[in-house]
Amino acid sequence: MGEPLVSLTGLTKWFEIGGGMFRRPLHVRAVDDVSLVIQRGETLALVGESGSGKTTLGRTILRLLEPTDGEIQFAGKIVTHLKDKDLKWLRRKAQMIPQDPYSSLNPTYPVNKALEEPLVIHGLGNRQERWERILTALDSVHLTPPEFFAHKYPHMLSGGQRQRVVVARAMILDPEFIVADEPVSMLDASVKVSILRILKEIQENLGVGFLHITHDLATAHHFAERIGIMYAGKLVEMGPHESLLTEPLHPYTQALIEAIPDPDPENRFRERPALPGEPPSLVNPPAGCRFHPRCPIAREGLCDVEEPLLRELRPGHFVACHLAE
Ligand SMILES: Nc1ncnc2c1ncn2[C@@H]1O[C@H](COP(=O)(O)OP(=O)(O)OP(=O)(O)O)[C@@H](O)[C@H]1O
Ligand SMILES: [Mg+2]
C-alpha cells in the first residue's frame, strides 16, 4: 500500500459521432479531464448514474479505448499510447471483468479452453503447468471440484457460475489491477453476495488493485476503501468511504445518498426526493458546473459560468463544487 498502481492525469475520452462530407463531426465528451490515483492493493469504487462515463473510463484506463487526451501511468510506466509488445505487457497486468456473464464467454469454448487462452496468448507454461493454473483459478472462485467445471460449456452453467468463470479468467494471468464493471448487476440477489465475497477475497489475499464500477453506493461502501462519484464525464467527488457517505460534500452525492433505499421496513416505501430534470448532453455540456441545471443550491453568475475544480476539503476527501465548504 501507499504505492501508486494507476495514476490518471487529465484523462479524457471523447467519441466522434456524426460528421460526413459536409458536416462537422460532433463529440460525446464521455470522460472529461479525470485525474485520480489508485494505490496497489486498493479498491476504488466508481459510482454514478447511467451514461456518466464509468465504463468508458474503465476501458480507457485498460487501453481498450484510445485516450483522446491526458496521461495514464500504470506501475510507474506511462501507458497512454503503448503499442504492440508493450501493450501486451499491460494486457497481462490489467484485466476487465465485464458486466454481462452471458455474452463475455465464448459459447463454443469449454471452461478449460476459455481459461487456457490467455495463458497461450502470453506463452505461459507448458500444457501440464497451464492445466494446474486452470485448476487453481477455478478453486479460487470456489468452482469445486475444479476438474468437474473445467469441462463444462457456458450453457451448462448458471449465471453466477459463469461470472465465476469470468473472474477466474481475469485472475489466471496474476494481474495487478482489475476493472470490475458492475460485475454483479445482472445476477440474482443471493448470487450477488457470493460473487462480491469472492472479489473481496481476491482483493485481500492477492493484493490486487480494483476499480469497482457500480450504480450502488451500498455495494461501494462494502467493497471499497475509497469512492469516486462521476457526473456527466467528470469526477465530482472522491474520498474515503466513511467520510464520503457520512459527510457528502457535493449536492449530487447528497442526492445519491438520499436515494439509497432505507433498510427500515417502516420507511421502505417512503417517497424519496428524486433529482429533478435529466442528465445533461455530453455533446453540448452546460457551461460552468455540469450539475448546475439540476443543482438545488446553484448560484447564478458562478456555477453556470466557472467550472469547479476538485479541492481537498477534508483529509483525502475532494470535491468539485464552488459552494462546498
Ligand atoms: N462507442 C461509443 N460511441 C459514441 N458514444 C459512446 C460510445 N460508448 C459510449 N458512448 C457514450 O458515452 C457516454 C458514457 O457512456 P458509458 O457507457 O461510459 O457510461 P456508464 O457510466 O458506464 O453508463 P452505464 O451505467 O449505463 O453503464 C454515454 O453518453 C454513451 O452513450
Ligand atoms: Mg457502464
Image (cartoon, helix red, strand yellow):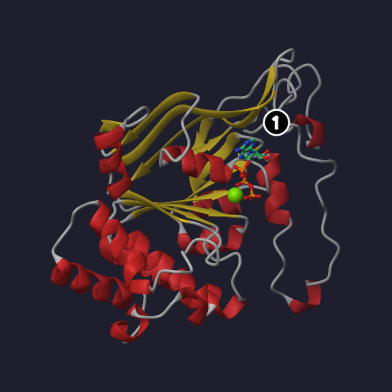
Above or below, comparing residue 193 to residue 236 in the picture: below
Above or below, comparing residue 40 to residue 171 in the picture: above
| Image-quadrant location for residue 148 | bottom left
How far from the left and from the top, in percent, is residue 236? 60, 36
Mark 1 within 8 Å of ligand 1, using the beta carbon:
yes
How far from the left and from the top, in percent, is residue 102? 55, 67
Q: Quadrant of the C terminus?
A: top right
| Image-quadrant location for residue 151 | bottom left
Residue type beneath disc 1? Leu
Q: Nearer the viewer, residue 302 or 104?
A: 104
Q: Nearer the viewer, residue 296 or 27?
A: 27
Residue shown at 51% from the left, 40% from the top: 57
Q: Is residue 215 left or right of residue 261?
A: left
Q: Nearer the viewer, residue 123 or 299?
A: 123
Q: Nearer the viewer, residue 55 or 39?
A: 55
Crowd band around label 1 with a 10 angstrom C-alpha radius: few (<14), some (14–19), many (20+)? many
How far from the left and from the top, in percent, is residue 263? 69, 73
How many numbered marks appear?
1
Ligand 1: quadrant of the figure:
top right
Residue 129 seen in the figure: yes
Above or below, comparing residue 91 to residue 60 in the picture: below
Identify the residue under disc 1. Answer: 282
Residue shown at 85% from the left, 41% from the top: 277
Residue shown at 66% from the left, 36% from the top: 232
Q: Is residue 220 left or right of residue 97?
A: right
Residue 174 seen in the figure: no
Under circle 1, the secondary element is: loop
How far from the left and from the top, in percent, is residue 283? 71, 27
Q: Is residue 163 left or right of residue 6?
A: right
